[in-house]
Image: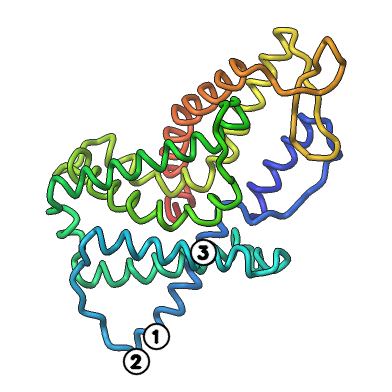
Amino acid sequence: SLLLGPILGLYCRAYGGYPLDYVWTAGPPWFILWLLNFTMIYAVIAQFAAPVKMNMPHPVILLLFGAFLSAAFYGAAVGVPQKWQFLGNVVGWAYVIGLYIPFFTAGIVAGRNDWMKSVEEMETWCVWMLRTIVVGFWLLIFLEFGQYQIPIPGINIDGDALGNLLPPIYAVPMTLALIQLFHQYFNGTPPSKIAKNAGAAAYTVYIIHPLIYNVWIIAFIAILKAAGVSIWWSQEQMFLYLTIDPATGAPSLLPGSYIWAGFLWTFFLTQLTVWPLAHFMRQLPVLNKIL
């Protein structure tokens, strides 16, 4: 928040030609801070509250609970004034109310009652139901973005309504599906060397990944410039960059092929660099004690 976030802002501002300024930003560690807050609250409550004994509900019941959380999320998203949404450096109180508090609580109950065993033993039809639902949500999200960005004709999805309803009802099946998938295919006993090191590095990856993918975004822009593509930086929306339409001289979106190339470039090169970098950062003195 005091170092990595401002460094990220400075080198992005410098490349885009914006005035240099040190700007404090919570960055990814905001979640760590609030996890600590939740943990302290739980530590106090645990002193006088009786442990909850509860078997894992059937995944279908959990999906219905996800729909209830979506209603709560929507209410917080439209009901909490915008000026209060980010109070305490959270990424929206709708997420705190509709996702983080319920999931933190569910994690405590799950850990105390060995819900992992139930996830590992889910019936095949249930596993494939969860996977199908998750892929269906991926398709819905793709269509919502694609209707404007690609664009895809004939699609008319209300992005605001989807954004205010989707997170919890998607997060429930996605969480269950991922836990089951990793149990089935990746969490071997003993774990492979790659899986073991990746698991250990995941926390560091979470903290440093914005710095890494922005480096590759800048590298891609530099390649476009070297290839003769004109790049225009908006002065109204910081870090928004477009190209110049040679026919009109006005700013316009990059061609679709460039956008897809940039997406693939950034995704793969980020994955290929952020994990090894995180692994070796954890070997450094001091950092090996805290990461």
**Mark 3 or mark 1: which is in front?**
3
Q: Is the C-beta separation of discs 3 and 2 under 8 Å?
A: no
Q: Is residue 30 above or below residue 12?
A: below
Task: Estimate the spatial distance between the alpha carbons at disc 3 and disc 2, rounded to whole Å.
Answer: 29 Å
Assess whether mark 1 and mark 3 are in contact (beta carbons under 8 angstroms): no
Mark 2 secondary-structure assignment: loop
Q: Which residue is mark 2?
A: 48
Q: Secondary structure at mark 1?
A: helix
- The local crowd at label 3, few if under 14, some if 14 to 19, many if 20 or more residues have their Cα within 10 Å, is many
Q: Nearer the viewer, residue 123 or 21?
A: 123
Query: Whole-percent x and y of residue 143?
Result: 50, 34
Give the CA distance from mark 3 to mark 1. 24 Å
Indicate the quadrant where residue 208 lies.
Answer: top right
Residue carrying label 3? 73
Residue 219 position within the rendered picture, expressed as x and y whole percent measured from the top left: 64, 22
Name the residue type under label 2.
Answer: Phe
Q: Quadrant of residue 60?
A: bottom left
- Could you tell me residue 225's position as x and y percent? 73, 14
Badge 3 or badge 2: first in the primary sequence: 2
Q: Residue at x 62, y 33 (%)?
A: 214
Q: Secondary structure at mark 3?
A: helix
Q: Quadrant of residue 227?
A: top right
Q: Amino acid at mark 1?
A: Ile
Relative to the observer, which residue lies in front, 279 or 64?
64
Q: Amino acid at mark 3?
A: Phe
Q: Position of residue 258 (x, y in %)?
A: 62, 17
Contact check, label 1 and label 2, Cβ < 8 Å: yes
Name which residue lies at 57% across and 33% down: 213
The residue at the point 63 percent across, 27 percent down is 217
Q: Which mark is residue 45?
A: 1
> Image quadrant for the N terminus?
bottom right
